[in-house]
Amino acid sequence: MNKQIINKVLQTKAGLGSLAIRVPVGIVLAAHGGQKLFGWFGGYGLEGTGQWMESIGLAPGFLMALLAGSVEFFGGLALILGLLTRPAALLTAFTMLVAIFTAHISHGLFISNGGFEYALILFAASLALTFQGAGCFSVDNRLTRFMDK
């Protein structure tokens, strides 16, 4: 792969602000992905989540649950570490847009009514990380320093 492309994906001039966004958003996403994939934290696992996704029009439900759960779980772990932050954040942002428009928008803004405010915040944070990168305390930053030598 072209070293220049890899550097563009990994490089970041962001400071501690990215860390302050990455870690809590990553924890929340990984936990939600764990619910979907493994049934952790009171989740329904792939089978139950797949059935629900099918019921709201995301078919095939099992595959959609696998994709969404994987993006949330593995993307969340990547954000926590600051590893491949831009691609992980971009996939997460897309997943949150799908959640907003398929599951939440018809319920209005507020989460107390099943609305999209929480997914919107995760979308905005993920989009910010897509633009600014992982920040100074990240695996991405270490990798770019290593590649520059």
Image (cartoon, rainbow, N blue to C red):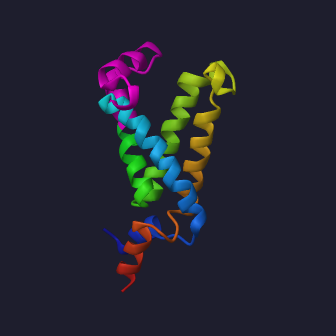
Which of the image's four quarters has the C terminus? bottom left
Prevailing SS of the magenta stretch: helix
Query: Which residues lie in the magenta part?
Result: 40-69
In the foreground, 122 or 149: 122
Residue drawn at x 58%, y 42% is 123
The image position of residue 36, as x and y in percent, is 37, 30
* Location of residue 27 with respect to 111 vertically, above or below: below
The image position of residue 19, as x and y in percent, is 53, 61
In the foreground, 52 or 102: 52
Please identify the quarter of the rendering in which residue 30 is found.
Answer: top left
Q: In the rendered structure, does residue 2 fall within the stretch colored magenta?
A: no
Of all residues shown, which one is farthest toward the bottom? 149
* Location of residue 74 with respect to 113 vertically, above or below: below
In the foreground, 113 or 71: 113
Residue drawn at x 36%, y 74% is 3
Residue drawn at x 40%, y 34% is 68
Which of the image's four quarters has the N terminus? bottom left
State whether residue 91 appears in this view. no
State whether residue 105 appears in this view. yes
Of all residues shown, which one is farthest toward the right? 109
Residue drawn at x 54%, y 22% is 103
The number of numbered discs placed on residues in the rendered structure image is 0
Of all residues shown, which one is farthest toward the front? 41
The image position of residue 100, as x and y in percent, is 58, 30
The answer to whether residue 96 is left or right of residue 61 is right
Q: In the rendered structure, does residue 67 fall within the stretch colored magenta?
A: yes
Please identify the quarter of the rendering in which residue 47 is found.
Answer: top left
The answer to whether residue 8 is left or right of residue 122 is left
The image position of residue 42, as x and y in percent, is 39, 26
